[in-house]
Structure formats: C-alpha cells, structure tokens
Image (tube, rainbow, N blue to C red):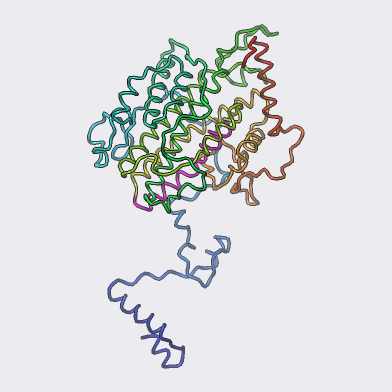
Amino acid sequence: VIRLRACARGEMSVSALSIGCAWRVGIASLVRPPRARVPRVSVSAVDGFGGLGRVTRRCRWATTSSAAKQKQGVAPAVSTLERPADGVWSGLAEWRLESARANKAWVWGKNDAVPADADAKHFGDENRGNVPPGIWASPFDQVLVETTPLPCTLAGCADLILRTKDPAGKAALSHRAYAKFAGESSSGTEKLALGFGSPPTSPARPDKPALVHPGLVPSPKTSELGFSQAMMHNIAHIELNAIDLAWDTIARFSPMHVSRFATSSFADGESRLSSSFSSREQKHGTFAGLPDQFFLDFARVADDESRHLGWCLQRLHEMGIAYGDIPAHNLLWEGATSTADSLPGRLAVVPCMQEARGLDAGPRLVSKLRGRGDNRSADIIAKISAEELAHVAVGVVWFREVCSVLDVDPQATFRAEIKRHAPESLRGPFNHEHRVTAGLDPEWYAVPGTDGQYRMGHEFLHENHTMNTPTDDDLPAALKTRLAQTLRMEGVTEF
C-alpha cells in the first residue's frame, strides 16, 4: 500500500513484482509478528571486522561477534597464552598417578561415561538393549576375549592386540593388558616385564570397512546414512587406529628399553643405566635406554583409546549402524609405517601431529553435532577431545627428552621429521590454547603473521637450512649413529 501511494505521487515506479512483494509482506504480517529490524552496520563496527562489511548493508554477522564466535567463544591471542614450564603439561603428574588404576568407564550412560555395573539412574533410554555384554565385545567374542590368556610381557600383549581383527575384542584385550601391567607396576614390588615385541607390518583389520583413498571416503554431509552416523563412524575408525598406533609404539621400540643396556663403567665410575630419561641426569648424547614410564604412558594411551572406541561402537549401535558400514582410509597407519625405524619421527608424527589434530577438530565437530540436535554424540566427542590433550602432552614430553639426549633443537627437529614423513600436515585452523597447554609451542607448527597471530601452518617449500640445523636427511643418521655407538659400547651387536 505504501508503495502504491508513493507511485501515485510519482515518487517511485511500480511493477508487478513490487506489487506482489508488497502483497506477500502484508499477508505474512497477519499470521506472524513482525521481525525486529536489523540495524545498519556502523563504520566503527565494520572497522572492527577488518572492513569486511559495507556501511549501507544490513549484516547479521557484523555485530560484536559472529555466530560461530558466540558458540565457540573468542579465542585468546596466542601471545597471551601461558606456556607450561619446560614444555611439560601441568597435569601430567596427576595423569600418571591415575594410571595406577584402570579407568572402567566403558559405557556411555545418560550424560557421561560410566562403568557397566553403575547404578541404573546413570543410564538413559539409549542404553536399553544397546549396552553390549562384557567390555564392548559381542556375546560370541566375549567368551573368546575373556578366555584368551595374556602373554607375560607388555610387548607380547602388544603383538597379540595388533594381530586381533575384531575392533571390540581389540579394545577389550587392551583394557585387560593395561590393567594387568599397570597394577603390577604401581605395586612397587615388580619391575615392568616389557619383553621384546615383533609387531606386524600392518595391524589385523576386520573385513569391513573397505579401505579406500581418502578422497573416496563419503563426506558426512552427503552420507546416505546421515551426518551424525557418518561422523561417529569416522571417529570410531580414528580411535581404532589410535589403539594400534599406541601398541605398535610399545612393541616396535621395546628393544630400546633400559633392560637391553647392560650396566657398564664410565670414566666417572658411575653407571649410566638409569631409570629416567632426563637430560638433567644424563650427559648429552649418552642414551641409557627408554625407561618403564615411556611404555606405561603409551599403554595408558592405548587403554584410553579403547574406551573411546567402545563409546563410539555403542553410539553407532544406538543409531542403527555398525562399524564397517562406511568406507574408510588407511592414512593414519601410513604415519606408523613411515616412522617405524625412527623414534623421534614416531613421536613427532603420531602424538604431536596426528593426535594434535584432534585438539583442533574436536570443538568444531561438537558444535556441528549440537547444531543438528545430536547432543549425545556431541558429548561423546567432547569427552574424547578433552582426554586427547594428555596423549599429545605425553608425546611432547618424550619428544623433548629424545631431543635432549640427541642434543638437537626440538623445534628444528620437529619440523625436520614432519617435513620427511608428513610435509602437508601442518594446516590450520589450530586450537592454540589446547596445543600450548599440552606443551606444543606455536613456533613448531605455525608461522606468525604480521599481527603476531599464528594462523598459517608451517610450509616446507623452498626452505633453506643452516649448517647447524638438522635436516630431514641428517637427523635419522645422527640418531642411528649415536644409538649404534652406545649399543656397541654396551656389548649389544644386534639391534
């Protein structure tokens, strides 16, 4: 009506489209209350967003914060983040103390993870008929898993688990193995029976899912099974690989345990056989073997990942699908294959790079699932992401210790190992807050911009190395040379 009156006064032209628009607006106002007008964006507001808006345009996002920032919170500047002393996560000591008792929260209850024998009030409607018997295993596999005798060494258990095909059985055996050796070690009466592993080149896998090129894995957005189902299937596949990666680290590097190095006399008359792996107690370049704590840390990681896999398998069952219904990729295991003969490479690629990506992606996945109303899956992924921080921190601690023994710079060494094994992996966006908390310095994986923010990952194209910086070629050689010298000195001729 307003437009028609303006046309009659000759103030504006009229068309059938404008008349139809005016009619529809009038009808809509009769059946619903008018929506509040969106204020025009001021110049000051636009300047605050780097000039991305226009003064004459109404923009819902150009307010004090974007919709994404309102949901996820405004990330603090990297320069303001408090870095842990010596690059060691402040919660590491407490996490190791908790390792003395195995976490039995195997089942996802009403709102959180709970033991399978918890009070019924902790279980919701989703748990009815969906909580598998035993520890995640199917009725058939439960008997097999519970009656399978565990090897007498931790590395032997690692070999057994790596050769177990069934995902639920692999998770159940992981928990049994960790509970056995963590309990014996915490008692203080027995030393860790590590033994020597003979891990397979690739872990045993079920017949499904089909492993395809990463580009052929269906996107959750386009998956016929649904976004939440595809996302939880992807997470389950990641957790399954994480179990095997932790056990492979134990088995593959078991020959580097301190028990392999016989006590010998040095010029100072002191034994270099040490129960710690700290540069404060050992001379640079003198390798006395990996202590029990290294292998117990990664056994704890494997146990955590087995619980995570159990939650994912349970959630998939609740949603009416099973692991294997969607194709997956083998990209995560390629990192293990590439670093099979390099301890610093393994630590840099698996916990410090691959698991750190979980810190970056976790909050984003949680936000997407909540936006689709799947709060139960979102809660599971939020819990998994929170526990992954400890796994990254463990990797960072041991990577720094290895670099200390080798007398090389951790930052340059990290970049050299990533350049060799996964040169395109350092890509943002990064969750700097959680990464820094875990002990990862932003300078390791990102480059500062002109504003001091670390948005871009470190690239390795046309990179010049100085004579004092270890490159991807000379770093593994330096490691092998130092280890070979120490082994010969200790009378070990086969490694």
Q: Which residues are magenta?
A: 347-373
In the image: residue 438, left or right of residue 19: right
Q: Position of residue 424 (x, y in %)?
A: 61, 43
Q: Nearer the viewer, residue 76 or 385?
A: 385
List the single residue furthest toward the bottom: 9
Which of the 4 image quarters holds residue 309?
top left
Question: What residue is at 70 percent from the left and 25 percent from the top?
Answer: 478
**Is residue 364 on the magenta stretch?**
yes
Q: Nearer the viewer, residue 383 or 38?
A: 383
Which of the 4 image quarters holds residue 277?
top right
The secondary structure that dominates the magenta segment is: helix
**Quadrant location of the N terminus in the rendered image:** bottom left
Q: Nearer the viewer, residue 132 or 114?
A: 132
**Quadrant location of the C terminus in the rendered image:** top right
Q: Position of residue 447 (x, y in %)?
A: 64, 45
Q: Position of residue 47 (x, y in %)?
A: 57, 63
Q: Position of residue 317 (x, y in %)?
A: 31, 40
List the single residue furthest toward the front: 207
**Is residue 75 on the magenta stretch?**
no
Question: What residue is at 45 percent from the left and 93 percent from the top?
Answer: 10
